Amino acid sequence: MTTLDTAASATTGGPALAQERRLVTAIPGPRSQELLDRKAAAVAAGVGHTAPIAAVAAGGGVVVDADGNSLIDLGSGIAVTSVGNAHPKVVEAVQRQAASFTHTCFMVSPYEGYVAVAEALNRLTPGDFPKKSALFNSGAEAVENAVKIARKATGRQAVVAFDHAYHGRTNLTMALTAKSMPYKSGFGPFASEVYRAPMSYPYRDGLTGPEAAARALSVIEKQVGADNLAAVIIEPIQGEGGFIVPAEGFLPAISEWCTANGVVLIADEVQSGFARTGAMFASEHFGLVPDLVTTAKGIAGGLPLAAVTGRAEIMDAAHVGGLGGTYGGNPIACAAALASIDAFETEGFVERAAELGEIMLGRMRALQAEDPRVGDVRGLGAMVAIELVDPATQAPAPALAGAVAKRCIAEGVVVLTCGTYGNVLRFLPPLSIGDDLLHEGLDVVAAALAAEVAA
């Protein structure tokens, strides 16, 4: 048994973990460093990591490493473990399903779990009309299939994405993604017939929603043309791009134009979906009813699963055999998704996300009032960010954001960065985190930002 195994066997996952920030060693500790050394020798250099720890257990609002350090988790594995790591319902469902069968391939021998997840998604996603779903493995795969479906349904090829967008790391989704480093640089050529329109970015463009929409639609009409356009894909709240919340009226105007021109509107809810924003889907905050919705991340409590859900007549456009994949809708992942959806609907996680958002927005706005380097505070529910800037010019301050995040991790709080300019700190705590632990984590963030003044 390795030292990592020994450490893991001494810890219990799920809510039984002590909900505390605890630093036993410097980070990384010796056992974590052992794993990091093995990683450097065995894993491709392109696979990076944010926190230099060897995780052995997680639950509630903490992640425990191999050295016994307990870190407050403000990242949720990038909005994945929203119901909390090792949620009891998810654990039990996974164990039960694994004991029955682990795989048949749904395209060979269908099973109830896949159908039940599709039924749940058809019921939960925005829109009161007949829907169908197809299941995949990752958010990027879901986005790629949504584009395939839209192209087949419309007989058109062009796709429009937006500035600051992130949609994945496959060839097509890299083309849709706006940020070069680290996602695109050196990996081209990319898929063709992908175009980009300006996004509503209230902090930086100063436009109203209708003004920003008119600007975007002018670009689309001039550079692409509605007759050539299969789909417009947009994140209702942008994720990797910096948690950008569009100005009121922007998304409805884009949606109305798509409907009027027979263009499929795809909402990428991979990061913003499943209670994260204080609604089951972020689209609900804006009265947005997409034609297709892509989901992943929070859908299955940490297991790999993704989906495209949308209008039945559009979803049915693809010919038999045109959609699928060997592992898509794996039975264990489906079991985890059904358990997670049950938890979302019966354990108050939507309401809890809203409560957490009030705490985070309140704390960050107070910080903004004291520190002019906090240029913007934004977000909905438990999807909150601060944009760090040069107070004299409002220019992005990526070095500051990176230094603050690094200092937070050293002090036992996992904080992630994002943004086209790399200057945004994003907060995505598990919805199972307690108020006291969240406040303590935000205390560390505030102290880390203050310490960078002294530095």
Image (cartoon, helix red, strand yellow):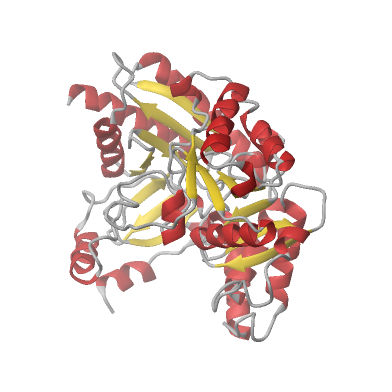
Q: Is residue 372 visible?
A: yes
User: Could you say where residue 348 lies in the image, as x and y percent from the top left?
Assistant: 68, 46
Q: Is residue 213 above or below residue 234?
A: above
Viewer-nearest residue: 7 or 48: 48
Viewer-nearest residue: 297 or 229: 229
Q: Is residue 229 above or below residue 163?
A: below
User: Could you say where residue 116 lies in the image, as x and y percent from the top left?
Assistant: 73, 68
User: Which quadrant of the rendered structure holds the C terminus?
Assistant: top left
Q: Quadrant of residue 49?
A: bottom left
Which residue is pictured at 54% across the width and 79% down the height?
Answer: 326
Which residue is pictured at 62% across the width and 29% down the height?
Answer: 250
Residue 77 left/right relative to 394: right
Viewer-nearest residue: 81 or 226: 226
Residue 104 left/right relative to 193: right
Which residue is pictured at 48% across the width and 41% down the height?
Answer: 196
User: Which quadrant of the rendered structure holds the N terminus?
Assistant: bottom left
Q: Quadrant of residue 364?
A: top left
Viewer-nearest residue: 212 or 366: 212
Q: Is residue 356 visible?
A: no
User: Could you say where residue 303 lies in the image, as x and y percent from the top left?
Assistant: 52, 66
Q: In the image as oriented, which residue stretches furthest toward the right?
A: 129
Q: How many marks?
A: 0
Residue 408 left/right relative to 209: left
User: Could you say where residue 84 lies in the image, as x and y percent from the top left?
Assistant: 54, 54
Q: Is residue 359 above or below residue 94?
A: above
